[in-house]
Image (cartoon, rainbow, N blue to C red):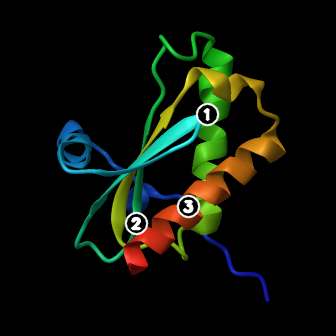
Amino acid sequence: MCVRYRFNKRVRLSNSEHYHSVFQKAHCVNSLYLTILSRENFLGSPRLGLAVPKKEIGNAVDRNNFKRLARESFRKNQHKLPNKDFVVIAKRHFQKLSNNETFLVFNKLWSRLFLFSLG
């Protein structure tokens, strides 16, 4: 049986207040390629926000590719994640990764966030 996970409005950070609350008191996990900030929410499901600075990734095609991969990774892992707001921030070195390598990096960071929420 195939379970479908969606990326709808309910799981998105939708305005600047949501982003600011995550940036104020965030738990942070890093890699060379991206950073994920997280903060507890009381909504019953995880939510995702994306920050892809032009200064880090100047090409619009690469920025959009990063967003697409981040949303897909979140969509596939949201059932494992704690009820937190997440902001994914791209770093310059992301452009060196293939799509499969990007998913491996995301999976590693999601796992670290999950383990942190347990302990």
Residue plotted at (34% across, 65% down): 84
Give the structural element (helix, strand or loop) at label 2. loop
Instruction: Name the disc covering residue 110, or none.
Output: 3
- Contact between labelled residues 3 and 1, with CB atoms less than 8 Å apart: no
Q: Quadrant of the C terminus?
A: bottom left
User: Which residue lies under the disc numbered 2?
Assistant: 46
Q: Nearer the viewer, mark 3 or mark 2?
A: 3
- The crowding category of the residue bearing disc 3, from other C-alpha atoms within 10 Å (few below 14, some 14 to 19, many at least 20), is many
In the image, 2: left or right of 49? right
Q: Nearer the viewer, mark 1 or mark 2?
A: 1
Upstream in sequence: badge 3 or badge 2: 2
Give the structural element (helix, strand or loop) at label 1. loop
Q: Quadrant of the N terminus?
A: bottom right
User: Which residue lies under the disc numbered 1?
Assistant: 33
Q: CA distance from mark 3 to mark 2?
A: 12 Å
Indicate the amino acid at tag 2: Pro
The image shows residue 29 at horizontal and vertical percentages of 46, 50
The image shows residue 74 at horizontal and vertical percentages of 57, 57
Q: CA distance from mark 1 to mark 2?
A: 22 Å
Of residues 64 and 96, which is closer to you in this image?
A: 96
Q: Residue furthest front?
A: 119
